[in-house]
């Protein structure tokens, strides 16, 4: 672990995919913490220029994912759960990476204040574990419909362990018809 400016960074075992926790300063009024500081990320070797914050409210059992954008619209993201709890998942889609196709999952909650730094080249998704959850994520590039791709959340080639029964999941119509991983792989790398 490396401690920078009251932020604790933890490596995940997948290159460039980091968990970080801000130092929280509680008092009798509540608490305060710095959720993001660009110089801290620059010191760590990352220099994302975030342009937008996205917020989604979802109910228990919702899966949003697995999504990514192709170049030139690829996005770096920082994901945090403001209220409730989610299982956040990132899959390394960088063909030249030694951890290509590896996935990482972490529980992010409104109480633990952990955040996941997801660099460009990763697919991302999450499952809502609590009755409701508010999720915020920063992005460093615009959304572009023509660049948006993804694969099925339960693709056996990737084998994500969502930790619960698939029959209870709620997905958008778009996410239900995403291709298998190998079809996406052919689309991106052919």
Image (tube, rainbow, N blue to C red):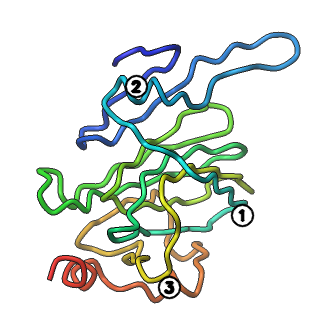
Q: Residue at x 17, y 51 (%)?
A: 99
Q: Is residue 42 above or below residue 115?
A: above
On the image, numbered disc 3 is attached to which residue?
A: 176
Q: Quadrant of residue 44?
A: top left
Q: Nearer the viewer, residue 18 or 138?
A: 138
Q: Could you tell me residue 37's position as x and y percent?
A: 54, 27
- Where residue 46 is drawn, which disc sits there? none
Question: Which of the two discs, 2 and 1, labels the residue nearer the N terminus?
Answer: 2
How far apart are the two marked residues, 2 and 1, measured between alpha carbons? 29 Å
Q: Nearer the viewer, residue 94 or 91?
A: 94
On the image, numbered disc 1 is attached to which residue?
A: 59
Q: Are marks 3 and 2 in contact (CB under 8 Å)?
A: no
Q: Quadrant of the C terminus?
A: bottom left
How far apart are the two marked residues, 1 and 3, measured between alpha carbons? 17 Å
On the image, numbered disc 2 is attached to which residue?
A: 9
Q: Is residue 161 above or below residue 185?
A: above
Question: Which of the two discs, 3 and 2, labels the residue nearer the N terminus?
Answer: 2
Q: Nearer the viewer, residue 81 or 160?
A: 81
Outermost residue, top direction?
27
């Amino acid at each position: 672990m490396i401690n920078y400016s009251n932020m604790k960074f933890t490596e995940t075992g997948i290159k460039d995919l980091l968990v970080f926790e801000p130092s929280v300063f509680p008092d009798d009024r509540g608490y305060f913490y710095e959720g993001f500081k660009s110089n801290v990320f620059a010191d760590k070797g990352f220099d994302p220029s975030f342009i937008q914050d996205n917020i989604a409210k979802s109910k228990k059992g919702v899966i949003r994912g697995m999504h990514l954008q192709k170049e030139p619209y690829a996005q770096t993201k920082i994901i945090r759960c403001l209220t409730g709890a989610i299982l956040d998942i990132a899959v390394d889609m960088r063909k030249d990476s030694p951890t290509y196709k590896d996935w990482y999952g972490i529980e992010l909650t409104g109480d633990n204040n952990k955040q996941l730094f997801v660099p460009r080249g990763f697919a991302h998704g999450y499952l809502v574990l609590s009755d409701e959850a508010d999720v915020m994520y920063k992005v460093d590039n615009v959304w572009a419909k023509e660049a948006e791709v993804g694969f099925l959340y339960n693709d056996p080639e990737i084998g994500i362990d969502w930790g619960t029964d698939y029959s209870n999941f709620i997905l958008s119509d778009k996410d239900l018809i995403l291709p298998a991983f190998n079809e996406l792989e052919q689309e991106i790398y052919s």
